[in-house]
Protein backbone atom coordinates (compact mmCIF):
# COMPACT_ATOMS: atom_id res chain seq x y z
CA UNK A 1 0.00 0.00 0.00
CA UNK A 2 1.22 3.49 -0.83
CA UNK A 3 1.83 5.65 2.26
CA UNK A 4 -0.48 8.62 2.52
CA UNK A 5 0.78 12.13 2.96
CA UNK A 6 0.38 14.09 6.17
CA UNK A 7 -2.71 15.81 4.80
CA UNK A 8 -4.84 12.71 4.35
CA UNK A 9 -6.85 13.37 7.50
CA UNK A 10 -7.85 16.83 6.37
CA UNK A 11 -10.73 15.93 4.14
CA UNK A 12 -11.42 14.09 0.96
CA UNK A 13 -8.75 14.20 -1.72
CA UNK A 14 -9.67 16.79 -4.29
CA UNK A 15 -12.06 18.45 -1.86
CA UNK A 16 -13.07 21.87 -3.01
CA UNK A 17 -14.93 23.12 0.02
CA UNK A 18 -15.12 26.87 -0.03
CA UNK A 19 -16.11 29.56 2.35
CA UNK A 20 -17.16 32.94 1.09
CA UNK A 21 -14.22 34.74 -0.44
CA UNK A 22 -12.67 37.73 1.29
CA UNK A 23 -13.74 40.93 -0.30
CA UNK A 24 -11.33 43.69 -1.19
CA UNK A 25 -12.05 47.36 -0.96
CA UNK A 26 -13.47 48.66 -4.24
CA UNK A 27 -10.64 49.90 -6.43
CA UNK A 28 -8.07 48.03 -4.30
CA UNK A 29 -6.01 45.60 -6.33
CA UNK A 30 -3.79 42.91 -4.83
CA UNK A 31 -0.20 42.58 -5.99
CA UNK A 32 0.27 39.79 -8.55
CA UNK A 33 1.31 36.60 -6.77
CA UNK A 34 0.49 37.92 -3.30
CA UNK A 35 -2.20 35.27 -2.71
CA UNK A 36 0.21 32.47 -3.60
CA UNK A 37 2.94 33.95 -1.39
CA UNK A 38 0.55 34.31 1.55
CA UNK A 39 -0.39 30.62 1.31
CA UNK A 40 3.29 29.61 1.17
CA UNK A 41 4.03 31.75 4.21
CA UNK A 42 1.22 30.17 6.24
CA UNK A 43 2.39 26.71 5.19
CA UNK A 44 5.90 27.51 6.39
CA UNK A 45 4.37 28.52 9.73
CA UNK A 46 3.20 24.92 10.04
CA UNK A 47 -0.46 25.34 9.11
CA UNK A 48 -2.29 22.60 7.25
CA UNK A 49 -4.07 23.11 3.95
CA UNK A 50 -7.42 23.00 5.76
CA UNK A 51 -6.29 25.68 8.23
CA UNK A 52 -4.89 27.90 5.46
CA UNK A 53 -8.06 27.54 3.38
CA UNK A 54 -10.26 28.41 6.34
CA UNK A 55 -8.13 31.37 7.42
CA UNK A 56 -7.89 32.75 3.89
CA UNK A 57 -11.47 31.83 2.97
CA UNK A 58 -10.30 30.08 -0.18
CA UNK A 59 -11.02 26.65 -1.62
CA UNK A 60 -8.92 23.74 -0.43
CA UNK A 61 -7.99 23.08 -4.07
CA UNK A 62 -6.77 26.68 -4.48
CA UNK A 63 -4.38 26.28 -1.56
CA UNK A 64 -3.19 22.95 -2.98
CA UNK A 65 -2.43 24.75 -6.23
CA UNK A 66 -0.46 27.43 -4.39
CA UNK A 67 1.59 24.77 -2.60
CA UNK A 68 2.26 22.81 -5.80
CA UNK A 69 3.57 26.04 -7.32
CA UNK A 70 5.70 26.53 -4.20
CA UNK A 71 7.25 23.11 -4.75
CA UNK A 72 7.99 23.88 -8.39
CA UNK A 73 9.52 27.25 -7.50
CA UNK A 74 11.70 25.70 -4.77
CA UNK A 75 9.95 27.49 -1.92
CA UNK A 76 8.58 24.29 -0.37
CA UNK A 77 9.92 20.78 -0.10
CA UNK A 78 7.80 18.22 -1.93
CA UNK A 79 7.26 16.02 1.13
CA UNK A 80 4.60 18.42 2.35
CA UNK A 81 2.28 17.12 -0.39
CA UNK A 82 3.87 13.96 -1.73
CA UNK A 83 6.22 11.41 -0.20
CA UNK A 84 9.34 10.15 -1.97
CA UNK A 85 7.83 6.69 -2.55
CA UNK A 86 4.87 8.25 -4.38
CA UNK A 87 7.17 10.55 -6.38
CA UNK A 88 9.03 7.44 -7.55
CA UNK A 89 5.77 5.80 -8.63
CA UNK A 90 4.70 8.93 -10.52
CA UNK A 91 8.09 9.10 -12.24
CA UNK A 92 7.85 5.43 -13.23
CA UNK A 93 4.33 6.04 -14.55
CA UNK A 94 5.48 9.06 -16.54
CA UNK A 95 8.32 7.05 -18.06
CA UNK A 96 6.10 4.03 -18.84
CA UNK A 97 3.47 6.21 -20.51
CA UNK A 98 5.87 8.71 -22.05
CA UNK A 99 3.52 11.44 -20.89
CA UNK A 100 2.94 13.95 -18.12
CA UNK A 101 -0.80 14.23 -18.80
CA UNK A 102 -2.70 13.96 -15.54
CA UNK A 103 -5.60 11.80 -16.76
CA UNK A 104 -3.50 8.95 -18.17
CA UNK A 105 -1.11 9.10 -15.19
CA UNK A 106 -3.99 8.95 -12.71
CA UNK A 107 -5.52 6.00 -14.53
CA UNK A 108 -2.15 4.22 -14.63
CA UNK A 109 -1.38 4.91 -10.94
CA UNK A 110 -4.84 4.14 -9.57
CA UNK A 111 -6.94 5.43 -6.71
CA UNK A 112 -4.21 5.26 -4.04
CA UNK A 113 -2.48 8.34 -5.49
CA UNK A 114 -4.35 11.64 -5.72
CA UNK A 115 -4.25 14.17 -8.53
CA UNK A 116 -2.58 16.59 -6.11
CA UNK A 117 0.18 14.09 -5.37
CA UNK A 118 0.72 13.61 -9.11
CA UNK A 119 0.83 17.39 -9.68
CA UNK A 120 3.25 17.87 -6.79
CA UNK A 121 5.52 15.05 -8.02
CA UNK A 122 5.57 16.52 -11.54
CA UNK A 123 6.24 20.00 -10.14
CA UNK A 124 9.21 18.64 -8.20
CA UNK A 125 10.52 16.90 -11.35
CA UNK A 126 10.26 20.19 -13.30
CA UNK A 127 12.12 21.99 -10.51
CA UNK A 128 14.93 19.43 -10.55
CA UNK A 129 15.13 19.48 -14.36
CA UNK A 130 15.36 23.29 -14.27
CA UNK A 131 18.19 23.09 -11.72
CA UNK A 132 20.08 20.66 -13.95
CA UNK A 133 19.62 22.91 -16.99
CA UNK A 134 20.84 25.94 -15.04
CA UNK A 135 23.84 23.92 -13.85
CA UNK A 136 24.71 22.98 -17.43
CA UNK A 137 24.50 26.61 -18.55
CA UNK A 138 26.67 27.75 -15.65
CA UNK A 139 29.29 25.09 -16.36
CA UNK A 140 29.82 26.02 -20.00
Image (cartoon, grey):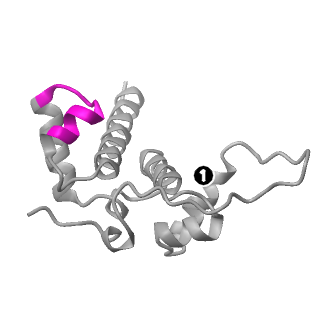
Along the horizontal axis of the image, is 24 left or right of 101?
right
Q: Position of residue 20 (x, y in %)?
A: 67, 60
Which residue is pictured at 22% across the width and 66% down the height? 4
Kindly identify which residue carries mark 1: 36
Write the start and end of the magenta stretch as one range. Answer: 97-107
Residues 132 and 55: in front is: 55
Residue extending furthest toward the right:
27
Which residue is pictured at 31% across the width and 47% down the height? 115
From the image, give the main secondary structure of the stretch colored magenta. Answer: helix
Q: Position of residue 80 (x, y in %)?
A: 37, 64
Residues 15 and 131: in front is: 15
Along the horizontal axis of the image, is 33 left or right of 59?
right
Relative height, residue 101 to residue 16 (above, below): above
> How many numbered circles does the render carry?
1
Question: Crowding at label 1, few (<14), some or many (≥20) Cα neighbours within 10 Å?
Answer: some
Which residue is pictured at 38% across the width and 59% down the height? 77
Residues 113 and 78: in front is: 113
Q: Position of residue 34 (x, y in %)?
A: 69, 51
> In the rendered view of the protein, which quadrant contains the N terminus?
bottom left
Tell me if residue 35 is in the magenta stretch. Answer: no
Tell me if residue 105 is in the magenta stretch. Answer: yes
- Dot 1 falls on a residue whose secondary structure is helix
Which residue is pictured at 28% across the width and 66% down the height? 5
Q: Position of residue 88 (x, y in %)?
A: 16, 49
> In the rendered view of the protein, which quadrant contains the C terminus?
top left
Along the horizontal axis of the image, is 33 left or right of 82?
right
Residue 40: quadrant of the picture: bottom right
Amino acid sequence: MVPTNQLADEGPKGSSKTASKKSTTPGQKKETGSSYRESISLCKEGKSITEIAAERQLAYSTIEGHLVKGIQEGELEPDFLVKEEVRSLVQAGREALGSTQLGPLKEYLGEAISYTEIKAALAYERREERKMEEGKKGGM
